[in-house]
Structure formats: C-alpha cells, structure tokens
Amino acid sequence: MLSVRPSHHLSPGPYPRLVAAGFRQQSAYRLAALAGLVANTTFGFLKVALLLATVEAAGGELRGYDVGTMSAYVWLSQGLLGSVNLYGRSEMAERIRTGDVVVDFLRPLDVHAAAVATEVGRGLFALLPRGVPSVLVGAVVVGMTMPTTPGPYLLGAVSVLLGITVSAATAYLVAATGFWLVETRGVALLYMVVAGFLAGLYVPIGIFPAPLFWLATATPFPAMLMYPVDVLSGRVDGLASVGLVAAQVGWLLVVGALGQLMTRRGRRRLEVQGG
Amino acid sequence: MAEPHGSALAPYRAVLASRIRSQASYRTSFGLDLGSSLLVGLTELAEVAVLFTSVSAIGGFDLAAMLLVFGLADLCFSLADMVVGHCDNLPEYVRTGRLDVFYLRPQPLLLQLVTSDISLRRLARALVGLVALVVGLVVNDVTWGFEAVGLLLVAVVSGVATFAALFVWAGGLQFFLVNGSEMTNAFVYGGRYAATQPGTVWGRPLVVVFGFFFPMAFTAYLPAATLLGLDTFAGLPAWAGWLAPVAAVWAWVAAGLSWRTGVRHYQGAGG
C-alpha cells in the first residue's frame, strides 16, 4: 500500500508512518480496548456520583463548576485516560531494560522521535474504542454541558493531540532514566502517583487550594489532561483557551528538548558499557 | 483441602519467608517501593481532603466521618492486596507458562498462587489506612464500649475477607480474559474506590452493583454509619454495619464459583 519513494528534504519523513503503525498495532487488541472502556465508565460513574454530590453540597456551584460542567469534566477526563499516558510505563522502558534499544540506535531514525511518534499513534487509536464511547455513555446516561459553537471543538482537537504528545514525550523521559538505572519500575510508580493527581485526573485542579494549584501548573501534567478537558468542554474559552494550548506547546518544547539531551547522553553511556 | 497439622503448611511458610527475605535484600529498590506506596495512600487521602476545602459534608458525611470510611476501606484493601493482590498477575503467569508449573505440583493451585509472592511494600499502604482509621476514631464522637470495639473488629476482618474474595473472583475471570484484565480491574480497583465513598451519594444502579453485588458498601461505609449513628443508604436499618460478615460470605461464594470455573476452563499455555 505504501509507495516507496526516494526520500528528499521535502517529504515529512518516516515519523507520520510510525504514528500510523502505532495506531494499527493497537487495533489488534480488541478485548483489551473493550475492557478499558468498561473500566473507564465504571470509574466515571463512581467519580460522577461523588463529585456531583459535592457540587450539590456546595449549593449547586463549586468554584465555577455546576452539575453539567462537572459531569463534562468527569467524562472527558475518563475518555482521555486511555490515550494519555499517566502511568509512566512504555515499550521504550522495556527496550532499554533488555538492551534491545541498541538495535534502535543502528536505524537511520531519531530514536527519541520514533518512540514518541509510535506512542502518539497508540494514544490516538485509543480514542476510538475507549475515548469517544466513554464520553457518549456519560452524555446519554448522566448528561453534560458542552459548547454549542464549533470553535472549542476545533481548538479542543488540537489540544487533545498536544496532550497525548506531551504525555508520550514525558513518559519517554521516565523510560530514558533506564539508561542509568536499568530498572525504572520505581520511577514509573512515582510518576504515576504524581501525574494522576497533578493532571487533574481525580479532582479538577481548578478546585485545588491555591498552593496546590500553583504546584500543579508548574508541572507538565495539567497539559496532558486538564487543559484539553478545559478547552474541549468550553470551561475555558476565548483568549484564555488559546493560552492553555500555548502552554501545552511550551511544555512539549521543554520535555522534547530534555528527551533529546537524555537520549544523547544515554547513547554515550551505552557505548561506554560496550553496547 | 488445608491439613489440620502444622507440618503440611511448613513448605508454604518456608516459601513465604524466602519471598520476604528476597524483597528486603534489595534495600534501595525496596525503600523506593515503600516510599511510593506511602505516597499513593497519601494522594488518595488528599483527593478526598481537597473536596472538603469547599464543602462541609458530602452525602451526610463530614470530613471526620469520611476519614473513618477511608481508613477502614484502605486498611482492609491494603491487607487483602498484600496477601492475594498478585492474583492480578494471573494473565502474566498464563502467558509465560508459569501457571503450568503450578498445575504439575500436588498442591492446591490457589494456595500456590497466593504464596508465590507477598508484597511487603504494601505494608506502607496499610499503614496509611491504619493511621487514617485511628485518627478517624479519635476525631469522631464514638461511644466506646464492647459494642464499638466488636463492630470494628468484625468490620476489619470481614472487610479484608471481602476484598480478598474480590481478587480471587477477578482471578477466576482472568482465565477467560487474558487480554482484558482491565475489565476485572474495574470492579477490583473500582470497588476499592467505591468502598471509600459514602453509599448515600450513589444512584440506584451503583447501589445494586457496589452496594450488594460486589458488596463494597459493607466493608467500610455501613460499619462506619452504624458506629457513628448516621443515615444508611437504600433504607437499610441502622445496625446494617453488623452484616459485614454476610457480605464477606457472599463474596467468597462468588469467588469460589468463579475460581473453580476458571481453573476448569484453563487449557494450558502450550508449554
């Protein structure tokens, strides 16, 4: 299907194809996708019960959230959960641990960009069997307030793509610590605990007390989940929503640069070890 | 089944002792694991606490009462998780053929699986639960006496048994769902999350699923409501917390059926 052309500097290179490969690879696990959907919706119903009870206890409005917008937060965040890597585990971590990464360095590809591109493809695929259906279940069974103009959806799509990419690039940093540590399970566990909480997975960061809120915004984690949810749900709109997307781009540049640096240092370390 | 004599259990004791020694020997890794487990417990507590920075009560439970529910649920879950939580690894054992080795030995499969690992780092989680429970008992207005102590003992023992049953229940289903273990995570970890909530916030479907079918409400919320004299959900009487052992028995009946069906269905990994 894919035509082989001599590469020249105008072609986008192999990375879009790696995104597509990651997408296709994930489509092989249908039962896993269904299982993920069941898990997402179960947690969605439990979260929505607790958070809507909290909104009601607050008199119908909790720091800018009403019943409709809180429900939108719950279901959009549950929908993104399969696509955004908040667990810190990745295939790259395993390749570094086993030493398979040596083969990757022999290929005419940027190891870092290739790993992130494949992960982004996987994340995009998960939107189909997990993301969209969870949001639909929530919309039909519980109901939610969503924007009525196309703007938030268009910018929201960009924000979701950026969120998935930032999470893939950050999870890569966890894997890259393996060049020095070999076993990264502990780092991944630590990442999982911190990422979920600060990304706004359990409670929207907008209702955090001020010091905790500023701590969260000083990390890349809200750029993975909270910002895409805020933009897509229209809770943050206009110039402020463009600001959130800009922050995502900023974090992508930071974690991307760090990934490049760690990959180069890591490669040298492998060579020293005789890999 | 289990022999009345201590000698029959001696091999399991030896295996467990060696697992414990092996974990403690990698000090740095063990320390990091302990620290992370502690942090997991603390963030889960923080999630609840954050909500109470805006409101004074959720579903009729104030922060003090919620702390009691959280502590009870978390302590019971962590203890069950430490002993049988690695039943989660069943798909991994199936894929790698390790389970086939268990089938070759003349010992009950479940007992071998249970003693194949014991995660000491989960003690840190249990500690968070225990501290939350103790603080919860201190800050609430509990009328101390034989009744309160008895209720707490019944609740902890039944709660650990119910959560342990949940893991075994899930393990049985995982023989069918090797690639879909997230399906069972939905009720094991979803169940843990449900157990930390006051049942009064649930709509009818959740009452059916996590109130009675997977009897999570009986592990922490109902005993706490009985202890504090608070309203219970679904029109249950005020003494419903004492029914925790009934819930544990039901959970083990379901777990036993699930496990037997799974074991009979298993065809081997082709090793």
Image (tube, rainbow, N blue to C red):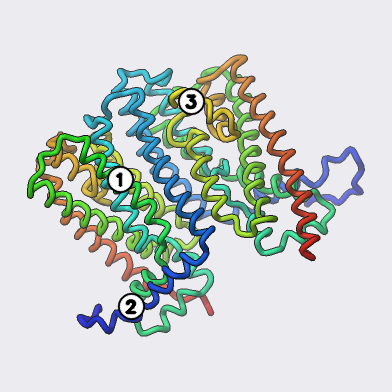
Say whether residue B12 is left or right of residue A14.
left
Say whether residue B160 is left or right of residue A72.
left
Count the numbered circles shown. Answer: 3
Mark 1 highlights which residue? B131
Circle 1 SS class = helix
What is the CA distance from the residue labelled 3 to the residue labelled 1? 25 Å
- Answer yes or no: are tags 3 and 1 on the same subunit: no
What is the CA distance from the residue labelled 1 to the residue labelled 2? 36 Å
Circle 3 SS class = helix
Q: Is residue B232 above or below residue A7?
A: above
Give the mark toward the camera: 3 or 2: 3
Q: Nearer the viewer, residue A11 or A187?
A: A187
Q: Quadrant of residue A102?
A: bottom right
Using the image, tell me which numbered label, if any, was put on residue A211: 3
Q: Amino acid at mark 2?
A: Pro
**Residue at 36% across, 53% down:** B188
Mark 2 highlights which residue? B108
Percent across and percent down for residue A29 are 56, 55
Q: Are marks 3 and 2 in contact (CB under 8 Å)?
A: no
**Residue at 25% across, 59% down:** B161
Closer to the chain start, of discs 1 and 2, is: 2
Say whether residue B182 is left or right of residue B158.
right
Q: Is residue B12 above or below residue B254?
A: below
Percent across and percent down for residue B247 are 19, 54
Pointer 3: residues within 10 angstroms few (<14), some, or many (20+)?
Answer: few
Residue at far top of view: A238
**Residue at 21% across, 56% down:** B158
Percent across and percent down for residue A27 are 60, 52
